[in-house]
Image: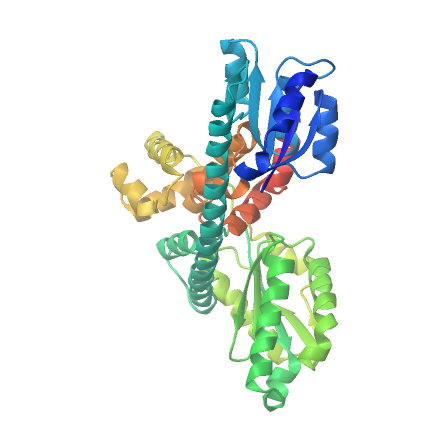
Amino acid sequence: MLNMLIVDDEADIRESLAMYNWSQSGIKLSATVQHGIEALQWIEENHIDLLITDIRMPIMDGLELVKRVRAFDPYIKIIVLSGFDDFDYARTCIRYGVSEYLLKPIDRMKLIEAIDRLKTIFLQEEEREERNRLLEKRSNFLIRSLRRGFLDRLLTKPLSVYEIEDGCLSSEMILEGNSFVVILIRIDQAVLNRHIYTESEWKLITFTLENIITELWDDEGHGYQFINRDNNYCYLITAEHSPLFELLKQIRKQLYRFRGLFRSTLSFAIGQPVTSVADIYLSRQKADKRMLELDEDSFELLNEHDLMLQNTHRPSHQSKNISGSSQNIVNKAKGYIYHNCHRAITLSEVAQAIHVNSSYLSHLFSEVTGNTYVYYLTACRTEKAKELLENSHYKIYEIGELVGFRNPRYFSSIFRKLTGMTPNEYRNQRGT
């Protein structure tokens, strides 16, 4: 049953509406109150699915109530009752996301019909949410599979710019920065005494590692992780350097909480920083080599001077002399991306649309903007998401879908990475 609240300053209307047998319509009448303040208090203390409110009321009128309810809970369905056939009221109600607008005197049949429509919407939303949960589960599985394959290639061999762009796009990753390092975490006993683990224990350790590291590393926006399931070597990729030592100490501390499961000490080694995504495999090789030189329970990281990269940062694109034709090509690409970023578009499609070679466009994008195509595409989607969070009442996962993110978890992660806050936090700060 749907929980309903009725708000009207006229006692006879409240009583008349309360007398109806709502249960036969699948509705539970939770309360009737006489103005907006009482309604807000009730809504904050009780779960409400449906609100029926008058427009003209003392203390707080219906429009102010609707506005505040929308800020508090954007998913409550609202029916507004008005004694005034006034277009401005109706227009304001639509802006605040009111579901139905009915004129007084109340026609009971029209009211029941309106409520039946809202019940249908509720059922459709429940079905859609269930379907979305299933699609999200499938999407998560596909993305994890694509990401794992891409990270495996990235850590083992040099990739072309196009392969990197395509891999980031299909596996929903952003690899941006002036330098990258690979950190290796080793379960020492997995190397020294692999036989002490049964197959089921080995799989459980892999599962535990992936979940802990994903939560502490990937979900926090520090980078990406890859676990070699043959030896449970855990590789962390990051473009962060200054807080790296403290981050890894925290991860080490959290992992040691599961020492009883691992039955082993842990060792950390870090590879040499590299200035290109294509060279990440070289940092991985250095991390492997350093690890071979370590004893058990080692925490071998580069010192602060090493992490300064010894002035090997890439030069700023702003210092380059960008030709007018190059700028024009990139501007055309930006325009195409902006108007099509809500769907899955590839670099090849953009290049074809503006009649240039895709590899050349990828090079120009980095040269002119200092960022990759994938980064710009993601930034466009994030900007459109911000507009919807500020000016609409769509659910978070719906906004993600509308701007081109297939996976709600990835949407939240990327949004946080680019804005410093989650979509919910942004909506609470900036939303209407």
Left or right placement of residue 145 versus residue 352 in this view? right
Of 116 and 401, nearer the camera is 116
Q: Is residue 214 above or below residue 23?
A: below
Q: Quadrant of the N terminus?
A: top right
Residue beneath the point at 61% across and 86% down = 197
Residue beneath the point at 68% across and 15% down = 10
Q: Residue 422: name its quadrant.
A: top right
Q: Position of residue 86 (x, y in %)?
A: 52, 8
Q: Is residue 197 above or below residue 404?
A: below
Q: Is residue 188 above or below residue 132?
A: below
Residue beneath the point at 50% across and 66% down = 282
How many numbered tags mark residues here?
Answer: 0
Residue beneath the point at 68% across and 14% down = 57
Q: Position of residue 398 (x, y in %)?
A: 48, 41
Q: Position of residue 169 (x, y in %)?
A: 41, 51
Answer whether residue 400 is visible to the viewer in this image: no
Q: Quadrant of the C terminus?
A: top right
Left or right placement of residue 140 versus residue 348 in this view? right
Of 365 and 193, nearer the camera is 193
